[in-house]
Image: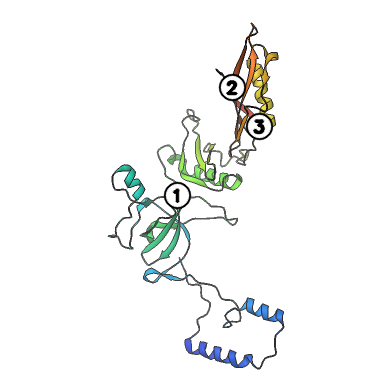
Amino acid sequence: MNYTRNLAVVPSRLLSALLVSATVLSGCSSQPTSNEGNEAAAANSTGIFDKTVAKVPEACEGGGIATGDEVTVSKSIDLRETPDASGKRIVNEKATEIFKETQYHGVDQSTRLTELCRQKSWSKIRIVEPDWLNHVVGWVPVSALRQIQRDSSGTRKYVAEDFMWDRHTTPYKAKLVNAVNRIVKENSRCPSVETSSLAKSDSRSSPGKPMFYVTCQGSQPFNVWFGPEDAANQSKKFTAIANIGQGEALTQCERSAKMAANNPQTVDFSRFMSVAFVPYPNGNSRLVSSFTAKNAFGVEGKFRIECFFEGGTQTETNISETID
């Protein structure tokens, strides 16, 4: 990584001469207009160069460079208090308290980091994700770091090294990575994924047809399921699924209540009271309501109904009798 960005270096004696000349000439030049002065100040706030020069990172510990780069690691590694292989590992106080045994802070492929200071062989990093650990700062070998890749739009481009592979996922590495990249590019609700979550779905897989999932990060994390061939299948859409509206959900759920009742004409479905509607960020929704209905003997009962939706399609209905 090359951090040398200066376009010009001015010797100290020449710099002094430039400053003196600028002072003398300032008394001889015509008074600039207000606009001219503002433009000059904006173009050259230091008064040393004709054009603004690039800013370079400040120095940090041990003559290192404060890069501020977004990085991650290629494998699990402990954080050190000092830039030295014999430096003390950083103790995870909370985990130590819970497990009653000394635990240490470490990072792995699923951790997003900011590089605070790069020396020749060691780098000082701060944990960015998971965000509850963003107070943790420590040193790791430079050899353990790698850049996080992004495309021209700024969307993260995931690579195989970002994930933790097992016997189920390894045979499909390239296809699964491509699928994840399609998800974050096409699904507006999934700006990034939890890389450690990539796994085979036992409940959705069948013999000869494995299904996998990855967890999208955000204020409300959610899973996206896909097959290994979906990355190359242009008919497979990863765009965000629109949630069903509450009104339509109530209509479909009421219809389900009447279809389940022996006397549908006696169903009195609650559309306002006892109603809870929960839309999830993956496009799924859940509606809870209640209704009353009479049996063949005219005896009325009260029931709770839960309806589940994927987009606008109702996928499941649960009905249970309530007891006062």
Q: Residue at x 48, y 33 (%)?
A: 201
The total number of labels drawn is 3
Mark 2: which amino acid? Arg
Of badges 2 and 1, nearer the viewer stands: 2
Residue nearest the viewer, comparing 85 with 101: 101
Q: Residue at x 58, y 37 (%)?
A: 280
Q: CA distance from mark 3 to mark 2?
A: 21 Å
Circle 3 SS class: loop
As drawn, the label of residue 164 is none
- Tag 2 near tag 1, CB within 8 Å: no
The reply to whether the C-beta atoms of the residues labelled 3 and 1 are less than 8 Å apart is no
Q: Is residue 130 visible?
A: no
Specify which label sits upstream in the sequence, 2 or 1: 1
Identify residue type, mark 1. Trp
Q: Position of residue 52 (x, y in %)?
A: 59, 76
Q: Which residue is mark 2?
A: 304
| Pointer 1 residue | 132
The percent position of residue 29, horizontal first and vertical second, equals 67, 91
Lower sequence index among marks 3 and 2: 2
User: Tag 3: residue type?
Assistant: Gly
As drawn, is 10 to the left or to the right of 47? left
Q: CA distance from mark 3 to mark 1?
A: 35 Å
Of the pair 105 and 50, the residue shown nearer to us:
105
Q: Which residue is mark 3?
A: 312
Give residue 272's position: percent from left, percent from top. 67, 28
Name the quarter where the C terminus is drawn. top right
Which of the 4 quarters of the picture holds residue 190? Answer: top right
Q: Secondary structure at mark 2?
A: strand
Q: Is residue 132 left or right of residue 274?
A: left
